[in-house]
Structures are given as structure tokens and as C-alpha cells.
Image: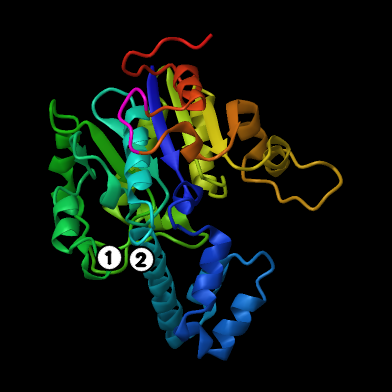
Amino acid sequence: MNAVLLTGAGFTKTFGGYLASEMWATILNQPEVQRSPELLKGMRDLENLDYEMFYEDIQAGGTEQQKKDLNAAIRSAFKEMDDNIRTYKSKSLSHSCCNLICRIAQDKAPSFIFTLNQDMFFERYHSREKITVFPGLPDHLNRFREADQNSTDFSVRLPGLEELEPRKRELFRKGFAQIAYVKLHGSQGWLSHDGSDAMVIGTQKASRIESEPLLKWYSSLFEQVLNRPDTRLLVVGYGFGDKHINQCIVNAIGKGLKLYVISPQSPQEFKNQFKPPLHGNFLQKPLGDELWDGLVQYWPTTLTDFYYENQGPPGDLTHRGRALFWSLGLTYITCRKLV
């Protein structure tokens, strides 16, 4: 049994992260937007407050100054979010969460945790008990520690094609890694192999991923891992808004992947996004019908309901946590099957 994780913005919301609507407000409040009447009006006029769509519009038709100002505002907003995560009051809860997700990821070595998040939550709070790598970036964690966990001082230039090839082979070498943490959309502090910002935002994510060797490899890893036999994908905090991600999941469902979701929405609210009722103002998620038909289990709660703070295994799992492990076909120390 292979268990794989995919996390989105809702995963770190509990620990100080921002959802898309909160990121819109944070970008709006930045001085670069406030002093530009055009950017301010454009942000206010967005029908669904989708800052990524606005970003795409500015990249396509804005002035060079508007592009520069909006990019700076977005970087500042992500820095503000990272500061919020860094100063979150319960660091032990954050550490416990990272310990839990590393235990859920049980696969052939390495086990995979994929994320669409670009914050530094996992870098700060992951357990060092397991050999953890960011594929293709052997110095990522060391550089982050050298920057004293300050995202302003942290930067890593991504490898080009020639530099990346031997690192691809290394990932699956025996003993190299127990956990592979894969940032599918890049990260704060990442610079492209050509020196530009490597965070993937906007509505043209797929094309941007194709142009960056590391992220293109990450995308192929995602497909490869999801299509392994007897694989169960647990999705935490992802709103299913990215078509290229949904397509990978749907393709794998067609080959036997089982989809599990943790989300704080009520089951009916969640379903309405995938199979909208005839009457009502609901925007269907990309490939919503196929995703809903592939759903195996839904847990209407947050991840913190599955574990206790400051306890080691197996006592760290709540009753709901033990039920989740068993439903995913996972094992944990001295656990007895629930009756």
C-alpha cells in the first residue's frame, strides 16, 4: 500500500498561512499597490478576487512599472505570510503536524509529500529524525538554516538541465532519502536557472512549469508516483482549482488511484464545487465530475483533529487519527484495529 500526500493553502491556514482570498487582501494592502491607482482599481474590480488572474492580466497588458510593482507587492505579501507562520504561537503544534504527515507518507523509499504551497512551513518544522530531501536541491535545507530561517535572506538558484540530470538518478539511490518533499509550484527564495523568480503563480502555471527544468521534473514525478499500483492520495487543504494538477489526479484515478480528502467544508458544500446543483451560483472545479466520481473518502475537518500535541507515536493519534490511518491502509506503532 502506497500513501502519498498533496497539500494546498488550507494545510498551513491553521498555522498562520493565508488562503487565496486572504492573499488578495494582503497584496491589496502593500504600498506598491496602494500608490498605483490602476493596480488598486484592478484589484478591487476582480469579480472573484482572484489575484492570480489579475497577475496574468498585468503580465499580458500592463506597463513595465505595473509589472514591477505588482511583482514586488506579491513578494512582500508572501514574506508577510511567512512571518506570520514563523511567529505562530504554537510551534509544538506545527512540529507535531509535520511529524504526522511524514508518518502518513508511507511508500517505497523515498516517501513523497507533494505541495502546492510556496511558504517555508515544512522547512521550519519538519522532523530531522528521517532523511528528508528537496529533490534536485541538495543544499536547500542547509541554506535555509544558514539564513537563520529568515525567508528574506534565503535564496537558492535552481539547477539547469545538465546539472539536474545526475540529481534525478540520485533520488532513488538506496539510503539517499526517506522523505521527498516536492514543491510543485516552486517556493519563496527560489530563483530560476536564468535568475528570475521561480514561484509559479497566475493562470498559465502549466506553461511556466514546462520552462523550468526542476519544476518540469517535479511534475513528472507527481504523475509517476500517482500512477503506481495500489496508491492512495490524501489531499489536505487543496481547493482543486488548478486544471493541470486535477488532470494528473484524474488520469491516475483511471488507473486505480484512490482519492481521500480532508477539508473543513461540509460535505454538501464540497460536493457543490464538483457537481454544482442546477439552481445556485456555483463555479465548477476543473474536471469536477471526474474528481467527484473518484472520491473514496471525505473527512470534513482540519488536520489538527487527527493528532495530539507534544506526544510521540502511537499516543499522538486521536480516535479520528487512528481511523484515518486504518482507512488509508497504514500502520503505526502498537496500534490495534478499531472496533
Under circle 2, the secondary element is: helix
Q: Quadrant of the C terminus?
A: top right
- Numbered range of the magenta stretch: 310-315
Q: Indicate the quadrant containing the N terminus: top left, top right, bottom left or bottom right.
A: top left
Q: Residue furthest right?
A: 279
In depth, the one of 162 and 84 nearer the eye is 84
Q: CA distance from mark 1 to mark 2?
A: 8 Å
**Residue displayed at 44% across by 43% down:** 7
Q: Is residue 186 above or below residue 66?
A: above
The amino acid on which the numbered mark 1 sits, given as a three-letter code, is Ser
Q: Is residue 144 left or right of residue 37?
A: left
* Residue 103 appears anywhere in the view: yes
Q: Is residue 231 above or below residue 246?
A: above
Residue 260, image x, y percentages: 53, 29
Mark nearer the viewer, 1 or 2: 2
Q: Is residue 313 magenta?
A: yes
